[in-house]
Amino acid sequence: MKLNQPLLTDLYQMTMAQGYWEQGQLDTQACFYMYFRDYPFKGGYAVACGMAQLAELVEGYGFSDDDLDYLSSIPAPGGGALFKQEFLKFLQSEPLRVDIDAVWEGTTVFPHEPLVRVVGPIWQCQLIETPLLNCVSFETLVATKAARISLVAGAPVAEFGLRRAQGAAGGAWASRAAVVGGCASTSNILAGKLFDIPVSGTHAHSWVMSFPDELTAFRAYAESFPTNCVLLVDTYNIEQGIRNAITVGLEMRQRGQRLMGIRIDSGDLAWYAKRARAMLDEAGLTDCGVVLSNDLDEFTIKSIRDQGAQVGSWGVGTKLATCFDQPTLGGVYKLSATKKPGGQWVDHLKISGTSVKLTIPGVLDVRRYVDSDGQLAGDMIFDTNVKPPSKDVIVDPFDDLRRKDLSGCGFETLLKPLARAGEVVLKPEQRNAMVAQQRTREGLAQLDESQKRLHNPHTYPVGLEKALWKRRHDLYAKLRGYDE
């Protein structure tokens, strides 16, 4: 699942790199930042993920002879080769020299604030744009979906969406991101091996169908897996399946074993979960859990719980691994500043006909403020090269009437070193999915409940440092040609 393939990028990144080479801009330093514009799933937060995969991109980054042979073979639409041989030799001779700072995985994040900042030669910053967006956007989306599901589940959630995921690599990284977001385990064995995350699973309907009858199938499974026995009861008739599972559970108890659970994968899940709980309790199998699956998401799970079902764990696949109701985060990567050798940083601003696409200039970072109760109070986007403000006032990027004074709150800076001069500096624990999961849990606990609800959540305050807002305002007016 290594991602350190330099050709995993868009063609225009490579053509721009050749253009910078030809135009004498190789020494131009640039600052880009990656962010997203709107809350995923119409929620009130996102959970950052994908930084471990980004680190893999950086490690071992370099162009092989085979890469250059392929680039040499690409024709220009007007005739001849698209890339010059001298440029391709230059590509292979130059190591990656970018500095990358990013929020740690599991950090709660919000629209318009930097998740990743890349500083280095402008042509190299361009080459890593596409793979950076690919891994951070996708995994942040999956981690956020997993967090939303885990918050309402009230019991462990197992991710098992590999069979419906977008390819092998997408499925593996989705499994990891789901655990970062809060899932207790995954059915994906390769992800378990690669990322040291817990795996779980039981049996399929085909197991039951391969035996003469359901009871025989259940007894055989209990014999083979006496310490991990969860029986799937909906192959033929759910109530009869529950009764057969109870028979096996009582037989296991006589042998000093335990039926850990039954799983229901079809039908009216809320009704059958309550019926199963009553039947198991009546039989004395009060320690046997009910597991539910079948196209679940946060809304279905909440509905089932609201109906009074007691569920021991959940299996969530398709709608988690594919982020079924929102297939993309909409992450973007924008140039915010450049610097010539020996010069100062120069602000850059992208303007379009849509106000929400207005970018932020400067070498950016984020301060996260925490109030005296330990709750998140607001985030300030600021320029690292500017003296810290005397008052901690933030201004909404798109409504200057919305401001908040965060003075008196403690704060931390969110962007942490990921790579320096092309070398990854993350410590092992900063790549660990289970450590990131704990960070997710702690971060969500600091959010107000109104910001975590599924419907119409409150908006978390994110704004520009006051002087940065003024700089952006003035640069906008200058670029538009307005008189001030």
Image (cartoon, rainbow, N blue to C red):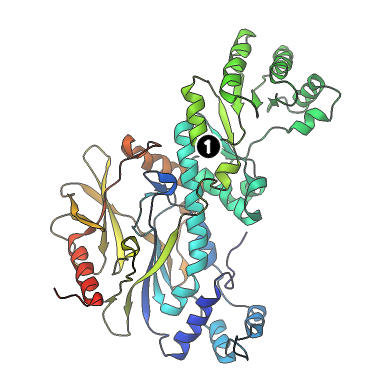
User: Residue extending furthest front?
Assistant: 353
159 or 303, which is in the foreground?
A: 303
Q: Which quadrant: the C terminus?
A: bottom left
Residue hosting label 1: 297
User: Residue extending furthest right?
Assistant: 212
Location of residue 274 by image quarter: top right
Mark 1: secondary structure: loop
Q: Position of residue 220 (x, y in %)?
A: 80, 24
Count of labels shown? 1
Determine whether 327 is above or below 458 in the image: below
Mark 1 Cα-neighbour bin, 10 Å: few <14, some 14–19, many ≥20: many
User: Which amino acid lies under the numbered mark 1 shown in the image of this protein?
Assistant: Asp
Q: Position of residue 209 (x, y in %)?
A: 81, 29
Residue occupying image coordinates x 41% and y 53%: 104
Residue occupying image coordinates x 53% and y 20%: 310
Determine whether 407 is above or below 14 in the image: above
Q: Position of residue 357 (x, y in %)?
A: 35, 63
Q: Which quadrant: the N terminus?
A: bottom right
Q: Is residue 456 visible?
A: yes
Q: Is residue 437 left or right of residue 63?
A: left
Determine whether 411 is above or below 438 in the image: below
Q: Is residue 97 visible?
A: no
Residue occupying image coordinates x 13% and y 56%: 391
Location of residue 474 by image quarter: bottom left
331 or 226, which is in the foreground?
A: 331
200 or 380, which is in the foreground?
A: 380
Determine whether 444 is above or below 411 in the image: above
